[in-house]
Image (cartoon, helix red, strand yellow):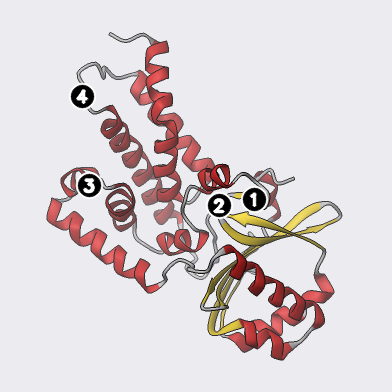
Amino acid sequence: MRTQEQLADQFEDHRAHLRGVAYRMLGSTAEADDAVQETWLRMARSDTSAVHNLRGWLTTVVSRICLDLLRSRASRREDPIDVHLPDPIVTRLDADPEAAAEQADEVTLALLVVLDALNPRERTAFVLHDLFGVPFDQVGAIVGASPGTATQLASRARRRVRAAPPPAADRATQRRVLDAFTSAARAGDFEALLEVLDPDVTLRADTGDATTAVSVRGAAEIATRAAAFRRTAGDQHYVLVNGSLGLLNYRAGRPVSLFSPVVRDGRIVEINILADAERLARLGIS
């Protein structure tokens, strides 16, 4: 029987992987940390001496915990028009590239938004198989389905993800497009905003309040809103949001909004804004 210290050492070897699974499945840093902690508690209470593939065993445990959380979340969700963005991972623009990639967890905020729209079993099947290479027989056991059904769940999720692909722009292009957007917004230049926005661009603004949250589509509508930006803008700082370029807006030394665009073919095709003061404070951004 392994000692607690030995178990803890073994668990630490897999902690980053488990947190990566949990974050992709839940889109919440706090819930991901809770799921990883619960996984440790279950490991500490179990006899894993006969487990030959501890990583696989732990992946199954954390996945089932996350699946239960997703199901509980879905059962509580009453207002389908409420705008909720997943927790972003924000790093300094001058952060070490390897450290920034690790903290961003190699998953864009835009992808997490798409995953949030999947049902719990679809999301679990897609994350485990497509992002972590878990075989479908194991995925099926986790979601309570046959391997064939698990394959179908992942396939449905994959179609949704492909309909909203991640950004393809490099960092320099992202910077050029964001500079053009902010300059046009500060100047109130409606035509310049239309030039930098894709005609079918979407905007989601999570304020933490369903009565003030925003979800709109179309360049003209969003350009009209962006033109008012100069009246409310504070100090802005470029940051990395899950590895992609974004803007952090400050007022009186406090973060008030996080602007995360998706840039493709030289234009902004999607804008996600987190303006929930409580969640921004929990991010620990300085």
Q: Is residue 102 left or right of residue 190?
A: left
Asked if residue 250 lies left or right of residue 65, the reply is right
Q: Residue at x 41, y 64 (%)?
A: 117
Q: Which residue is the site of mark 1? A: 279
Taking depth in this image into account, of 250 and 47 the one nearest to the observer is 250
Which numbered disc flags the more N-terminal residue, 1 or 2?
2
Task: Quickly name the residue at label 2.
Answer: 87
Q: Nearer the viewer, mark 1 or mark 2?
A: 2
Question: Do the residues bearing badges 4 and 3 touch, measured as CB atoms within 8 Å?
Answer: no
Q: Looking at the image, how many numbered discs can be counted on the residues?
A: 4
Residues at marks 1 and 4, CA–CA distance in whole angstroms: 40 Å
Which residue is most to the right? 252
Q: Report the amino acid beneath label 4.
A: His
Q: Which residue: 31% across, 34% down?
A: 61
Mark 4 to mark 3: distance in Å? Answer: 18 Å
Mark 2 surroundings within 10 Å by alpha-carbon count, few (fewer than 14), some (14 through 19), many (20 or more): many
* Residue nearest the viewer, comparing 204 with 172: 172
* Mark 1: amino acid: Arg
Which labelled disc corresponds to residue 52?
A: 4
Q: In this orientation, which residue lies closer to the viewer: 35 or 128?
A: 128
The residue labelled by disc 3 is: 139
Q: Amino acid at mark 3?
A: Val
Q: Earlier in the sequence, mark 4 or mark 3?
A: 4
Nearest-to-viewer mark from 4 and 3: 4
> Where is residue 286 drawn, in percent x and y?
75, 45
- For residue 280, say whether it is visible: yes
- SS for callout 1: helix
Task: Identify which amino acid the numbered label 2 is placed on.
Answer: Asp
In the rendered image, residue 1, in percent from the top left (x then y), is placed at 28, 8
- Residue 16's place in the image compared with 241, above or below, is above
Q: Position of residue 22 (x, y in %)?
A: 42, 43
Spatial CA distance of label 3 from label 1 is 32 Å
